[in-house]
Image (cartoon, grey):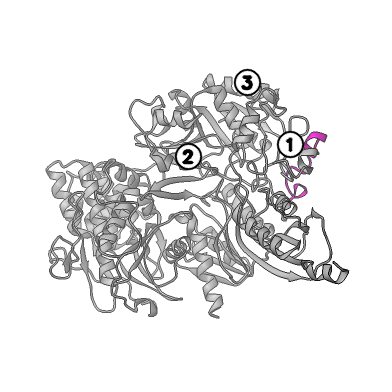
Amino acid sequence: MGAAGAMADAVPRQRLRLAIRGIVQGVGFRPFVYREARQAGLGGFVANTGSGVVVEVEGTPAALAAFVTGVGASLPGPASISSLESETLLPTGETEFVIRPSTTGGDRTAAVLPDLATCDECLAELHDPLDRRHRYPFVNCTRCGPRYSIVEGLPYDRARTSMRTFILCVACQAEYDDPADRRFHAEPNACPDCGPQLALWDANGGVLADRDAALLAAADAIRAGKIVAIKGLGGFHLVVDAGNDSAVRRLRRLKQREEKPFAVMFPSLAAIRAACAPGEAEAALLASRERPIVLVRRQGGDALAEAVAPGNPLLGAMLPYTPLHHLLLAELGFPVVATSGNRSHEPIVIDEHEALARLAGIADLFLVHDRPIVRPIDDSVARIVAGRPMLLRRARGFAPATALEREMPEGILALGGHLKTTLALTSRHGVMLSQHIGDLDTPEARDAWERARADIATLQGIRPRLVVRDLHPGYHSTQVAEASGLPVVAVQHHLAHVVAAMADNGLDAPVLGVAWDGTGYGPDSTVWGGEFLAVGEGTWRRVAHLRPFRLPGGEAAVREPRRSALGLLFAAFGRDGLAMTDLAPVASFSAAERSTLATMLERGVNAPVTTSAGRLFDAVAALVGLRQRCTYEGQAAAELEWAVGTTAPEDRDPNLPLEGRSKSQSDFGRGSYGTSELHPLPKVDAPPAHRLSTSPQGGGWPLPLPSGRSYSFALSEAPGVPLVVDWQPALEEILADLRVQTTAGEIARAFHLGLAAAIAAVAARIGEEKVILSGGCFQNAFLTEATIAALRRDGFTPYWHRMVPPNDGGLALGQAVWAAGMVERGEI
């Protein structure tokens, strides 16, 4: 064949440029691309950029097509691709494929990988006496280990992490440079010769032991009942023997944490099963690479101290997630309390020298290491609701992450609320939601929040241009927003809840949002909390709410459920309600106190009006004698849920499809927000306008739940104002049941089922098929599952939270998304 024929038969070469976004840094993605390209015989390069990974590949069209297909089909471990943009370039003749140094210019929008639990391969090395990393508590690879807790900037390279001061030894450098090694470009790579080390300190910072001897001495101290502060991945834990009641009680006393449950770390899933009864989904979540704390039901006969979770049928259980935890728990062989290393209402401690001061008087010893933690990251908390995980605290393993991926106006910084705060920042590619930061009650907590506020912008390289806050004028976050010098948008609390749930489920308007929680500032300056919001495209309005009542003492009622009960009784029966001394909350006050409280309620002095579902739960918990005073937020409502017991609604089936038959649609999402918010309520002796009963007649919507009787609520309505869900019929039934000594569990069950029926009844009146459940009350699994069942039975499609907490930890996301819509529509 001549030269001309050979050229005719030659296959033309092409060159592609791929811009890849997603979780593609710190997960072995570049080595993966390198191997795929070399195997396909392609030339070119791969490199990290501020926005992800860029790949240029050159070869035959068939080889290029196979490469692109392979990259999308066989990703390594935790990697994921959110977008892949392809561009055709002119061939350069390049035949070798290389990993180029990272580029630092341009967008810094690359996804930062959360910290991941130790993988099986690293665990095998940890326990192998012949391996050079045997018992080394900082073993990691591209599939596991620290990421977000050590990263200082993007793109993700060792030089921009807190590992930069640890110079790789010859052996580790060889692993780092070898494309066939799973530690190829593993940025936290280290070994006993070149990496971080342990030390055990006394309460004054004196070194008692180092390296493995430090770990063994710490284990001995825990066996002896001591409190050991242990520096982990995202901060310190305070650790004691979970079976030593006196040690646990001492920790409670010193930490000033009276009754709030402690989390427990177990050596293995088998050890968890010896104390608890995790279902299949709970077991899978416990063992997942994120390793959250999972709420599981305890079973009788466990060896844990009662003081771990007093009176609580649930336990926050978790498995070891770092090599240090694995070594410690293997050495001990029993579960330990592993609670956040802080004093109550303060942020978690991350620095060993700061720990000596802030944990002084609590910890007896300090097991520390010299790898700096860049930012505090608490343990995540989750539970299984309706057959799938629901995050209650979004932190280690899950944060940070792009909570909503779509094109958005850049630079919108949402500050959340006051409790369980998170932050959100928009980029051109979506919304980044921070880790859980906590309540803003103390100076220390506010300082940590300020650092996180600067950190989220610095890490993404985005300068905020708009700040979003809650409506509440007294929140610290509100004051910071107003002092920022930037344009400020205020988003109503419950609207933010609903929008966060929409984003979490990928929903567009219109929806009916049910936002139930303890407290949220309403546009009418009252305390909202039992809300039904019709959310349209850029519009929202309050279409229904729980019947208002007053809270004698205001904020004091949050700590004392008995005050909510008195407010409820007074709203229903006037002063006569406060004379019902056969009721536990009334009897808990003296005659003089009741007289003062009655006057406060009559005159509205320090007795704000509320529609709060959370306070309604508190009131019922007090009435049935479960809780008159709380020692932590949500305690009374939680105990009311526990009283229901283990039985779920009989018709609950997590495998049911979410789709329901269509209801009639209405244009309720298109109107403007009304100014008249409080509907005049019927007098006590007047029959309710619509009793929610089993009868299909009249205005009531039939919803008998087969799993038990439910208390009755009523719908009252008038033109131009929202529907009111009246709790008085249920209250009267509760009082009647109490007088015949019905158990707290039976009352709690009927109350929950009545609320589920009420939600379905409001949905029927409004007519929107998609119903969103959001707010802290829907952390309650029984309420959520009963409501899902009720809505599905009536043909509605219910949605509830998954990866974004239903509590105030989701507010920042909802604020950011709503404000972004306002910017896109030109409203701001």
Q: Is residue 702 left or right of residue 626?
A: left
Q: Residue at x 18, y 45 (%)?
A: 581
Q: Quadrant of residue 670?
A: bottom left
Residue type, mark 2 in image:
Leu
Question: Considering the numbered disc 2 on the image, is that residue within a helix, a strand or a loop?
Answer: helix
User: In which quadrant will I find the N terminus?
Assistant: bottom right
Q: Which residue is mark 1?
A: 190
Sequence-earlier tag: 2 or 1: 1
Q: How crowded is the residue under tag 2: few (<14 C-alpha within 10 Å), some, or many (20+)? A: many
| Residue 583 appears in the figure | yes
Q: Of callouts 2 and 3, which one flags the residue occurring earlier in the amino acid sequence?
A: 3
Q: Please, what is the dominant secondary structure of the magenta stretch?
A: loop
Q: Nearer the viewer, mark 3 or mark 1?
A: 1
Instruction: Locate the C terminus by quadrant.
Output: bottom right
For label 1, the crowd category at 10 Å Cα-Cα, with few meaning under 14, some 14 to 19 and many 20 or more, is: many
Tag 1, which secondary structure? loop
Please provide the residue range marked out in magenta: 156-173
Q: Tell me where residue 731 sits by quadrant.
A: bottom left
Question: Between marks 2 and 3, how big is the CA–CA gap?
Answer: 28 Å
Residue 58, image x and y in percent? Answer: 77, 62
Front tag of 2 and 3: 2
Q: Is residue 530 visible?
A: no
Answer with mark 3 or mark 1, whichever residue precedes in sequence: 1
Badge number at residue 286? 2
Q: Position of residue 517 (x, y in %)?
A: 38, 56
- Label 3 to label 1, Cα distance in Å? 24 Å
From the top left corner, tell me how far across and down residue 472 is, in percent.
47, 63
Residue picked out by circle 3: 217
**Residue 672 in magenta stretch:** no
Q: Quadrant of residue 95?
A: bottom right
Tell me the kind of residue under disc 3: Ala
